[in-house]
Image (spheres, rainbow, N blue to C red):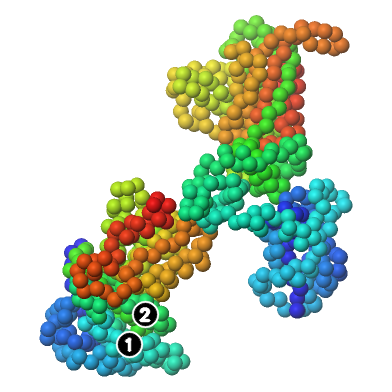
Amino acid sequence: MATKVVMEALSPTMEEGRLVEWKKGEGEPVAVGDVLAEVETDKAVMELVARAGGTLLKQVVAAGATVPVSQLVALIGEAGEAVENGAAPPKEEEAQATQPTPDRNRPVSTPPAPPAQAAAAAPAREVTGRVKASPLARRLAAERGIELGAIRGSGPEGRVVVRDLEGASAQRAAVAPAPAPAARAAAPSPRPVMPAPGGPPYTDVPLSQIRKTIAKRLVQSIGPIPTFYLTTEVDMERAWDAREALKALGEGPKVSFNDIILKAVATALRQHPACNAWWQDDRIRYWNEVHVSMAVAIEEGLITPVIRHTDLKSLREIAAESQDLAARARERRLTPEEYTGGTFSVSNLGMLDIDEFTAVINPPEAGIVAIGRIVEKPVAHEGQMAIRRRMRLTMSCDHRVIDGATGAQFLKTLKTMLENPLALVW
Amino acid sequence: MPTLTYRDALNQALREEMQRDPDVFLMGEEVGVYQGAYKVSRGLLDEFGPMRVVDTPITELGFAGVGVGAAMVGLRPVIEFMTWNFALLAIDQLVNSAAKMRYMSGGQIGVPAVFRGPGGSALQLGAQHSQAFESWYAHIPGLKVVMPATPADAKGLLKSAIRDDDPVVFIEGEMLYNLKGEVPEGEHVIPLGKADVKRPGKDVTIVCHSKTVAVALKAAEQLAADGVDAEVIDLRTIRPLDQEAVLGSVVRTHRCVVAEEGWPFAGVGAQVADTIQREAFDELDAPVLRVTGADVPMPYNKQLEKAAKVDPARVIAAVDSVLYRD
């Protein structure tokens, strides 16, 4: 009789695991304690260890597959033993054919708990009091990461039904304490290197377990877009000089600071493709092309025309295009193609004497940079007090896509470029 | 496309099948000289003669048994019951003989017979003549149960029933015989076991069959005026039940009301509700509700009879409930 190996709860909060790689092939002998496979949990990559010895008869689950805890993943038995297909769900005692051990070489934020403790760590609500909800509402809430207990149901006896889930984010924000973003800032995530222009316009990356967990927690904490803000101050002396020099040439369109910033943002995005992305609910779309949206105030409100392939255009082209787009935006003569499809946004209130502000993300984009005014102020410069032209940049990041360190690295590059405008043509 | 009554659509199906296949014959009380108690067999005696349109005495058990025997030796009898209430006398032939023969003979002998006639209530016919028995027959393995709601379905389904190699219980809707509708000419065959979307919608699924199809459509019309877009699924065949159609609709609407003429206990709606809760549990936003006839013998009194029947108002009330509008 074959022994069933099931997906173990390798951390207290683990609900499903991705089988990253098989360490034992079918037909290979297995001793107690041998590592059968690597499993990615919501926290880390861990090892699935055999408790029973024998031969690995069958890998029920393919590498790369994500399976819920307690689902059958493999069968161990005597060599040559016949295995039935689609074996029945494993029983509890069989589940103990595996036991989790943390991989010493990998970071593990929570020690794995034995199954009994894992059960105890399940949401208390399931044990103490049941939330009445329709099956559909229950399923959708789980998919959207909404806590049912926080919602007032409008059905009979307070049953939560689908219509109650609409606008549930506001209620969520009130109940869940905000997690510390810094704790997750350095979380690893699969990110593509931006390929040369001319390839496919974007790369879709399915969500990893850790990315799913981050997204779920943050949405519970803040709302539909869990935003955080990064601020830095940029020395604009050289950019100022560069603009004066371009103006002095007297040729072509007038280059504004906004144009220089658009160019710098696009160039920095090419170096930090992780910030040039869309949140797509079940995946993150990493764009291989850079299309920067620029917020333009018009009488009716706000519109964000897009400069396509911003990174591939010269400052002169960007200046001409931004002037044209802004002018036509004010006349409301933009076509929908001209104000949709951006991959990142820039919003500038410097001309209105705003020192610093936080811009609202333009979904599905994951980031926006808010530009304050350039103001002369006394600062320490090369060891001396000096009057310098300074500008404050604030980046709003969708934390589901951009982690703290990722955003900060992008912002640092952006600052370096603006402080060294030659880098824009480097 | 010509417009025919439900009775003439059935007549057309019988005539075409008798012309097509000399093994098909019709037998029952008053089917010949009187041309059918409901005039479904009008003109058939003249066209096909007394060997193929056979008048019988009032002997339900007897002529149903003759029909089973004829089918066992290769003929294709269509047995007309004046109403399904009278077929209670013949139920042994249907349940013990027709339904079991293929199984008990190890597949050697089939019973390609159709048992047909009006079912359900009409107007003030009293408790003994106003009964919907489809769930009884659908309960029996070996029987197919077919219930057309429109003239076109009546023709297409009767032709399929006659051509089917197993016994088919074909229950026509008493009160539907005068219903008019477009009916395709010639070869119009509707496969057994396929439900029909009589009205597409996205907010709630109303599952119905036979006479309750009209009730459901009327309810859907009134609901539409109130901003509720109801989908009406006509089962057409009770067994085999088109689970795919029902589940497909519920997956879209997340809510379901089943309307039927029969009594509530162990009715067709119970089977539908079970299928939905088992196969589409996570799609449900509300319990499946059933609207049925009252759980009493049908009253003779006109007002009480009206109160005991399914009507659009009760369907709308159930829809309001599953939409949490009440």
Image coords of residue A283 (percent x, y): 62, 45
Question: What type is the residue that disc 2 sits on?
Answer: Trp
Residue identified by numbered label 1:
B91
Residue B289, percent from left and from top: 41, 62
Please, which chain is the residue tagged with disc 2 on? B
Residue A370 relative to residue B206: left or right: right
**Number of other residues with Cα within 10 Å of mark 2, as a class: few under 14, some 14 to 19, many 20 or more:** some
Residue A140 in picture, x, y percent from top left: 55, 51
Vertical relation: B92 (above or below) A379 = below
B61 vs A200, nearest the viewer: B61
Residue B113, x across and y down, in percent: 31, 85
> In what element is the residue under mark 1?
helix
Residue at (42, 56) in percent of width and height: B322
The residue where tag 2 is placed is B136
Q: Residue at x 65, y 40 (%)?
A: A221
The disc labelled 1 sits on which kind of residue? Ile
**Other-residue count near label 1 (Cα within 10 Å), few / some / many at <14 / 14–19 / ≥20:** some
